Image: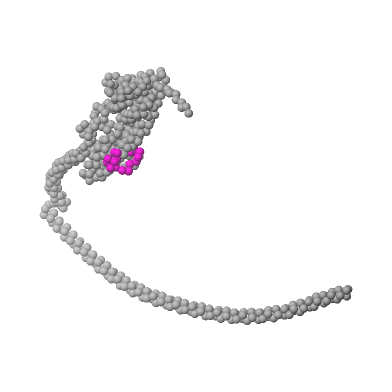
Amino acid sequence: MEGNIIFSILLVLIGIFVGIIIMFILNYIRGNLVGKKAEILLEKAKKDGEKAKRDFLLEAKEEAHRLKNDIEKELKEKKEEVKEAEERLLARESNLEKRDQTLQNKESMLEEKENNLINKQRTIQEEQSKVEEIKKEQIEQLEKISGLSKKEAKSMVLKKVEEMMNLEIAALIKDREAEALLEVDKKAKGMLVNAMQKYAADVANEQTVTVVSLPNDEMKGRIIGREGRNIRTIEAVTGVDLIIDDTPEAIVLSSFDPYRREIARLTIESLIKDGRIHPSRVEELYEKTCNDMKIKTRELGDEALFELGITKVDPELVEILGKLHFRTSYGQNALKHSIEVGQLAGIMASELGENVTLAKRAGLFHDIGKAIDHEIEGSHVDLGGDLAKKYHENDVVINSILSHHGNCEATSIIAVLVAIADALSASRPGARNDSLENYVKRLKDLENIGNSIEGVDKTYAVQAGRELRVIVKPDEIDDLASYKVARDIKNRIEEEMQYPGTIKVTVIRETRAVEEAK
């Protein structure tokens, strides 16, 4: 049993030894095979490398040959180009030589001609000197024969001609002047009549009262208010006198200022529509109406521009233009007057072949200063010129404004036409009312006296100038001082103004404490 085990172990060992020997032999054989393959591969690689080397050298030689041929070809072309350039240069040089020769020939010919001209000039000068000598001899002989010198004879001839011509010129000038005066006078009259015929506006004088219709007579009592507080507030705020009499369903607003009357009318109509009539509501609607009037002035200015066909006017200047609707000059509405002047100036400009649009523009703006002359110190001419300059109007328009009353010289025909149109518009029958203008001036003077007193807030002339209502600042004027203000105004009116009847001065001092519950 043990022997079998040992034998088995020996067999295993022998098997292992034999396996190792076989593996060694196989590895040896495999190594030899790999070495041979490597030698074969190396041999093949050497052959391929030599072949590639030969191919590369061949290609390099071919490329070098090709480059050589290209370079030789390019050199050949360059040589040909250089040769052609040399030939051209030679040809140019030959042409230049020919031109040089031609110029030399021309120069010699010119020199020869110049010499000939110099010789001829000398000959002519000699001939002229001979002629002058002969002429001088003849003049001397004539002077001896006539007994007069050359200057004396010339003076006698000129004097004789002058005497003859003076008579003819004087007669001609006299005839022409007479014809021109007749023709100019005739044409001027015809032009003015033609302009007035083409523009025939209705004559409408401004009134100093406005009638407001009421829905019923009960509304009169509501407007007056308890103990007259409503009517006092309306008159104090608007500066317009309310006349409430027996006229059925109507009240009358009296003021010399159309702008105030219009604001008062609109305020009262708004109160009537609203139905709530009390002092605070009056003040509220008055402020709203003032804002609405600014819009209306802009619309009036736009309408005037549209009527005359004028464009490109600054919006602020349009609003100022609209304010002329509420100004009068001797009873004539200032805006209507300006439109009329623009129309007349345009018609006359078309007759003379001038710029019609520019003439209309100058005529429309000629009195623009009247819209602000109550706000700013100065004449309406100077203020109008400043306004036109401020809003970059044409120089012709500016000169027309400054010269239409003769304050400065007119520099254009249009400026003269504007002055003529202004005179035509003012002188039309019924266009102006002198008594109304004096009345308005008296009322303005009354208000100016009141406003000039220190501590006065507003002054309104009412009752056709028979009463002056003065509203003072309550924080500056106390109750006792208000009596002094009234006496000072009364004394100044008596000293500075002339007026029929009497003028009542009423000083109003009012303090209000207002709080708003939120």
Magenta region includes residue 308: yes
Residue that appears at 41% across and 77% down? 84
Magenta region includes residue 131: no
Q: Which residue is situated farthest in the right direction here?
A: 2
Image quadrant where residue 282 sits: top left
Percent x, y of residue 238: 35, 27
Image quadrant where residue 420 sits: top left
- Work out whether 101 lies above or below 420: below
Depth order, front residue of 445/100 = 445
**Quadrant (top left/top right/bottom left/bottom right) for the N terminus:** bottom right
Image quadrant where residue 358 sits: top left
Percent x, y of residue 225: 36, 22
Does residue 117 appear in the picture of this structure? yes
- Work out whether 7 lies above or below 339: below
Residue that appears at 31% across and 25% down? 216
Range of the magenta residues?
Answer: 303-320
- Work out whether 498 lies above or below 48: above
Residue that appears at 30% across and 70% down? 107
- Work out whether 13 lies above or below 416: below
Residue that appears at 72% across and 80% down? 32
Percent x, y of residue 41: 66, 79
Q: Which residue is situated farthest in the left direction here?
A: 145
Prevailing SS of the magenta stretch: helix
- Is 228 displayed left or right of 176 in the figure? right
Depth order, front residue of 143/478 = 478
- Is 55 displayed left or right of 346 in the figure? right
Does residue 231 appear in the picture of this structure? no
Percent x, y of residue 437: 26, 28
